[in-house]
Image: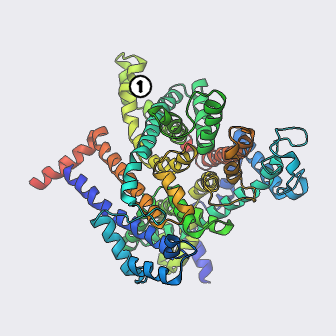
Amino acid sequence: MRAVKEKKIAQKPNYGKKENRAKTIITRLFNNKLAIAAAVVLILVILIAAFAPYITPYKYDAMDLSSKNQSPSFQHWFGTDDLGRDILSRIMYGGRYSLTIAIIAVLCAVFVGMVIGSVAGFFGGKFDNILMRILDVFQAIPDLILTIAISAALGSGFDKTVMALAISRIPNFARILRANVLKVRTQEYIEAAEAIGCSKVRRIVKYVLPNSWTPLIVAGTMQIASVILSLAALSFLGLGIQQPLPEWGSMLSAARGYIRDYPYQLIFPGCAIAVCVLCLNLLGDGLRDALDPRLKD
Amino acid sequence: MGRYVIKRLLWMIPVVLGVALLIFSIMFIVPGDPATIIAGDFSTEAELDEIRDEMGLKDPYIVQLGRYLYNVFIKLDFGNSYATGKSVTAELLTRLPRTLIVGFSAMILALGIGIPLGVIAAVHRNGWGDRISMIIALLGISLPQFWIALMMVILFSVKLQWLPAQGIESMISYLMPSVALCFGGLAGQARQSRSSMLEVIRADYVVTARAKGLTEREVIVKHALPNALMPIITLAGSQMAHIFGGAVAIETVFSIPGIGSYLVAAISKRDYPVIEGSVILLAIVFSLVMLLVDLMYGFIDPRIKAQFAGKRKRKAK
């Protein structure tokens, strides 16, 4: 009975229009050809990474010392590295690390940032103040430096790298959500929910969050791109994911020693990173325009 | 204004203390015994014990933290490197100028190229200038900076042999690192200045400026741009963080003996005092940059200066 009442009184202002709104957003997104092209390329990259074991011409760690450091040819489209491993196959496998790490790290950061941001924004006052000052400290350290420091402490490896990348992104998401929660908090439907005796947690989860989390979609997409770049830099510096695993940054790190003699080894892994990041940025732009056309310019 | 500066400076103290506390704690929880790192793997237990006593490694966390903060902020001493035994402070101070040269010249390039690109894009909205500027901006945020650096080395050092690939023999050595490092900032600036220019370009005062017969150039440079500068400067501040972060990889690519390469080299050796010192120093420099940005608001926007002046006058009454 209470649930029914609650629904009636504390309806969101756009109730009933919700489906329409989602539809307009999707239509707007589909009208943006560039964003859709980017999404298609991304899906392709994800499929290639997912099915890498079945479609790569060679295994990522298959060494063939008789054909090391070869230039691109019909056998090896992107050439081979210093141990005779096929670079194309390694790049196709590499997507697994870059994409999964970036996506998991951003999801973790979004989740923790969401908790911190909504709690800080909703309760406000001293509590908010303390949380924001702690975030100030985190943000006083440049992103990549913080990631490097945490990664240096934790060591390299999949889970540790995810953690290092996620922690450095939390303040970002927390701030975005907090700003939005502050706006939503004073709306009438939140007051209504309070008036009928909703608990604080319920108010946050049921009414505040659904109305304030959309900016995180755009920020999240953009952050996946930036995390891929950070991860590449991290692996390039010898942290993050290391040889023999075919992470793009670590491939660049290994190929760096051959910059004078075999520069093509450096070209292709970098292109792979660039394509992914470019598409994510285009998709992020498209999502932003679709969610809020006023921001377009 | 003076009071504001002092307030902002005082606020830096807890933030920097917080950074030091954070970094020290991260390094403290790391498994691994500093005594072993200093003495090497083949030392006896007695030797290790002596080092631990000498460095106070047996003290509880809070005592060690207090000692570290006291040394860093009162005695301005970051301790000695585990690997070389030399003073970290001295090393950091010789390396800092190089990192600053690379970082600030990258920032100047980013502003110097990014703002005009953005302005051109806004003035020729939806035209060719706009498209080309935005493509450059998009590539700038999408290409890994250290990869651009590597590609530049291949082109300009290996193939053409115009520029040195490594080291800092002369000022020319700073050219490629700064250019490679500026792309991210440049892209952000181009996008930001485009959107803030588009906002002001339709404002009444711009229309007025045109109506009184100023040339288009005067209208844009004297009337529109100054009013679009605020968000651009704000962005420049936060971009310094990316530039200092990127500098770590760039310094490694070009073997520039700056703070970034010092930090990277220290990581593989588990040289904690060096890691802590580098991170804290970079955070201090970054905080100072942000302070500078805040102060610049006052110069760019007279309204903000007036606010502070206004407060003081009101108080005097």
Disc 1 residue crowd, few under 14, some 14–19, many 20+, Cα 10 Å: many
**Residue A178 drawn at (x, y percent):** 47, 63
**Residue A111 drawn at (x, y percent):** 59, 68
Q: Residue at x 75, y 56 (%)?
A: A246
Which residue type does callout 1 highlight? Ile
Residue underneath mark 1:
B220
Depth check, front residue: A70 or B199: A70
Q: Quadrant of the C terminus of chain B?
A: bottom left
Q: Residue at x 47, y 55 (%)?
A: A142
**Residue A63 drawn at (x, y percent):** 85, 54
Residue B2 in sight in this render? yes
Depth check, front residue: A178 or A293: A178
Q: From what the image shows, is residue B79 above or below residue B179? A: below
> Is residue B81 shown left or right of residue B160?
left
Q: Residue at x 36, y 33 (%)?
A: B226
- Which chain is mark 1 on? B
Depth check, front residue: B313 or A148: A148
- Give the number of marks: 1
Q: Secondary structure at mark 1?
A: helix
Q: From what the image shows, is residue B147 above or below residue A126? A: above
**Residue A14 location, quadrant:** bottom right
Q: Residue at x 15, y 52 (%)?
A: B312
Q: From what the image shows, is residue A175 above or below residue B117? A: below
> Is residue B301 shown left or right of residue A46?
left
Residue A32 in sight in this render? no
